[in-house]
Amino acid sequence: MFGEEIRYAREAAGFTQGEVGKLFHCDRTVISRIESGRRKPSLEEVEALDRLFNTGDLLKRLYGRVDWNASIEHPDWFEEYVDQEAIAIGVRAYQDSVMYGLLQCPQYARAVFAAGDAAGDSKEVEELTRARISRQSRFLVPDGPLLLVILDESAIRTVVGGPSVMRCQMEHLLKVAQLRNIVIHVAPFSTRRTVIDTAMVLLELPDGQRLVYSESLDRGHLSDDSTTVVRHQRRYDRLRGECLSEGESLRLIAEALEGFKDDEQRARHSRLVEEQLQRHQRRQLHRGSPRIPARRRPGA
């Protein structure tokens, strides 16, 4: 509602979003996000808009009546997060148990969806996998936005999809970690004092706004409340200080890779032995079967 009032005032004053953006030294998309209700402006910005649009203190009074920290459950909560992620200039994430989405290789992502709600629907699994991989494109390139990820050690130890999938995932981590904008730390099981009990993402937007995102069982929670963001940022920074260095983290991932290669070889050997045993059992069964004499034809 507040964004709609700003749009109405802007149009009545004869300004375009681009013109307002230039006057405020920001991109047009910042004004668009304010008008669509996806960005909370500062009080100083609202006062400046009142002066620009010659609306007295109308916008300032409306601003003071909005409950900016109201808990609203959006049915499209994840789409709201993806919209912010798509324009973020910095992403700082913490992930436990499973691999962080923006670092998943296609084989791993496919295995995650195949074991989830989409199990049994190969078409949906492929659509979900493509959607996840497409979100990575702006990050996994040279000079892309900052992507700093803290992986709980459980994320690289928990086997998803089998050893071969995990081998691909570890190889993928070692490859993308060579990009200048990608930083990966591992929070080891030991020597840790700071505990973060759920995966979370801190987003930094082009206009300087910061958001924090986390998920519960059935929904996501995206907040721009400054107190909430600062609290989680401090916990994140403390945990980062307790993590392995970048080099140590990559060495641990490389060690995990070798372990999954060994597991893959053992699994392949086990399958081979099982196949040989089954063939042997079939031959034994065939040899032990009673012989039924062929029926003679009359007159033979």
Image (tube, rainbow, N blue to C red):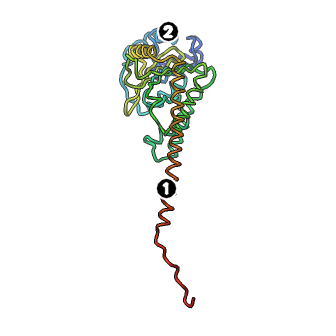
Total marks placed: 2
- Look at label 1 and name its amino acid: Gln
Q: Indicate which disc, 2 or 1, sits on the residue closer to the N terminus.
A: 2
Residue located at (48% from left, 74% from top):
291
Callout 1 crowding tier (Cα within 10 Å): few <14, some 14–19, many ≥20: few
- Nearer to us: label 2 or label 1: 1
- Drawn side of residue 185 relative to residue 191, left or right: right
- Residue 219 visible here: yes
Indicate the position of residue 34 as horizontal and vertical percent values. 49, 20
* Residue in front for this viewpoint, 73 or 41: 73
Indicate the position of residue 252 as horizontal and vertical percent values. 51, 24
Where is the N terminus found, in terms of image quarters?
A: top left
Vertical order, 174 against 277 (above or below) = above
The answer to the question of whether label 2 and label 1 lie on touching residues, with beta carbons closer than 8 A, is: no
Q: Residue furthest bottom?
A: 299
- Drawn side of residue 58 relative to residue 18, left or right: left
Name the residue that disc number 2 marks.
Answer: 48
Secondary element at image label 2: helix
Q: Which mark is residue 141?
A: none
Indicate the position of residue 222 as horizontal and vertical percent values. 42, 24
Callout 2 crowding tier (Cα within 10 Å): few <14, some 14–19, many ≥20: some
Vertical order, 116 against 53 (above or below) = below
* Residue in front for this viewpoint, 176 or 35: 176
Indicate the position of residue 27 as horizontal and vertical percent values. 58, 17
- Residue 4 visible here: no
Where is the C terminus found, in terms of image quarters?
A: bottom right
- Look at label 2 and name its amino acid: Ala
* Residue in front for this viewpoint, 243 or 48: 243
Name the residue that disc number 1 marks.
Answer: 278
